[in-house]
Amino acid sequence: MGAQELSSLLWKERELLELLTFKLEEEQLILTSGNTRWLQHATREVEQVVERLRSAGLGRTVEAAALAKEWGIDEDASLRDIAAKAPAGPWAEIFAGHLKALGELTMRIRELRDANDQFLRAAARSTQETVAGLAPDAGTYDSRGGTGLDAGARLFDKDL
């Protein structure tokens, strides 16, 4: 039953990776729309799926070690090793299919994560530039030795 249990866990992990892909694409749509009202919620949902993936990965690791031991393979064997050293029957092909699908999903997730990171960095830069443009230049002094803020305050005081 170890191979069947591991395969079931791998299916669940694949489903979670697909959900993570969806959540990252959702986050990207929010970022590219320019309306970041729901960004915090989308980011929280991504984090929740990542946490579920961590738990699923732990379960997979435990089950893979048990199956490797059952098949006479080193307990630290990777999924690739398990697929390569599976006994005669369908398990080599099944685990190779899981491995391929997991690799493709992981690659897509990396692409989305990197793109979202670039969008977030660009938004942060834009925000910093906007804020810097709103604040008076505090790094320069006027003819009286005051900063732009001091000069503005003096102008205001003159009006009183």
Image: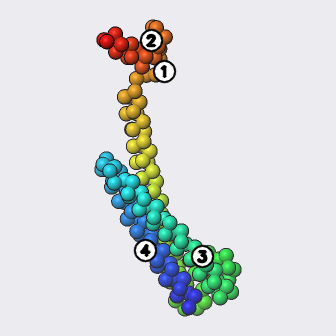
Q: CA distance from mark 2 to mark 4?
A: 63 Å
In the picture, the disc for residue 61 is 3
Placement of 81 over or under 89, stated as above or below: above
Q: Which residue is mark 1?
A: 139
Secondary structure under tag 4 reads helix
Residue type indicated by callout 4: Glu
Secondary structure under tag 3 reads helix
Q: Which residue is mark 4?
A: 15
Q: Earlier in the sequence, mark 4 or mark 3?
A: 4
Residue type indicated by callout 3: Thr
**Is 71 displayed left or right of 99 in the figure?**
right
The image quarter containing residue 111 is: bottom left
User: What is the residue that sits farthest to the front in this orientation?
Assistant: 160
Q: Earlier in the sequence, mark 3 or mark 1?
A: 3
In this rendered view, identify the residue nearer to me: 81 or 129.
129
Q: Nearer the viewer, mark 4 or mark 1?
A: 1
